[in-house]
Amino acid sequence: MTFPCLVLEKINKRFSGIGGEPVVALDDVSLTVNTGEYVCLLGRSGSGKSTLLSVVAGLESPDSGTILADGTAVSGPDRSRMLMFQEAALFPWLDVRDNVLYGLNLLDRLSPAERLERADEYIEMVGLTRFRHFRIHELSGGMRQRTALARALAPDPEMLLMDEPFSALDAMTREQLYADMQRIWSETKKTILMVTHNVREAVCVGSRVVLMEAPGKIVGDETVSLPYPRSMNDPELAKTAAAISALLPQSDKGGASL
């Protein structure tokens, strides 16, 4: 039997606020992500995007509801769902290759030679072969994110979770990484769930854009039918981004950028 990669049913999550007043982070969220989709969660800060990603990763437990990954209930972190953060979160005392090897060293099924071969394969995929022996402080911000991406992909997870991975980078670096992500997604066929507040970014890389608003509600789910590869400078992409932006609640338009 074939299952969707991810199924969330009626997920609720609250946190304690100032004075003990509960803050609603997720409110009755239901979402299905099929295998091989690139789904972008789009909305302003405080709409519940990152909380939803943390729940899917198993870092947070919902107060109620069901989460199934490949038909199995999610009860905590799992190597089948690798999380990539806004900051690269790399080990500064290791070089690029050893950072990528870190997760691979936990895979008993691979021999040391196989781990090294796989690390170099993914380092090449993200375009860092010449820099595999560089320490983290010697890398640009974009190269650090490429290293983090290689580290997340190398253990061959079923799903890659990305929490605003490009937001701290300059515009030119982001655009190059958008092109790289499209290529890597095409090559690996990975299921990707990515948080962003940038509408054009979501349309550039995503096959679907899921719209969220506070307090933690899904208010839209749009398929992006533009052909790949996509460019941020394409007029059709700008037109699609504007149409999706128009679907956001009026109060959210100040927090989600074109």
Image (cartoon, grey):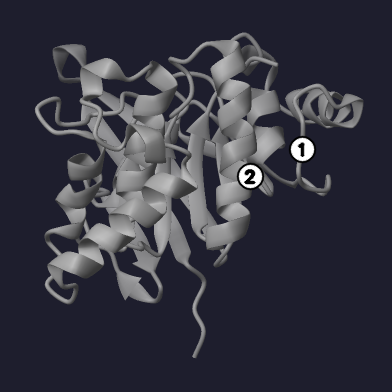
Is residue 26 visible to us here? Answer: no
**Which element type, helix, strand or loop, lies under badge 1?**
loop
The numbered mark at residue 65 is none
- Which residue is tagged 1? 230
**What residue is at 14 percent from the left and 31 percent from the top?**
91
Q: Image check: 148 left or right of 128?
A: left
The residue drawn where x is 27% and y is 17% is 138
**Residue lying furthest bottom:** 1
- Do labels 2 and 1 touch, CB within 8 Å? yes
Q: Position of residue 135 (x, y in %)?
A: 20, 25
Q: Amino acid at mark 1?
A: Arg
Q: Is residue 147 visible?
A: yes
The x and y percentages for residue 89 are 23, 29
**Residue 239 occupies which quadrant of the picture?**
top right
Picture quarter containing residue 157?
Answer: bottom left
User: According to the image, label 2 marks what residue?
Assistant: 182
Q: CA distance from mark 2 to mark 1?
A: 8 Å
Q: Residues within 10 Å of mark 2 (few under 14, many from 20)?
A: some
Whether 217 is drawn above or below 10: the answer is: above
Q: Picture coordinates of residue 42 (x, y %)? A: 58, 31
Q: Residues within 10 Å of mark 1 (few under 14, many from 20)?
A: some
Where in the figure is residue 109, as x and y percent of width and height? 17, 77
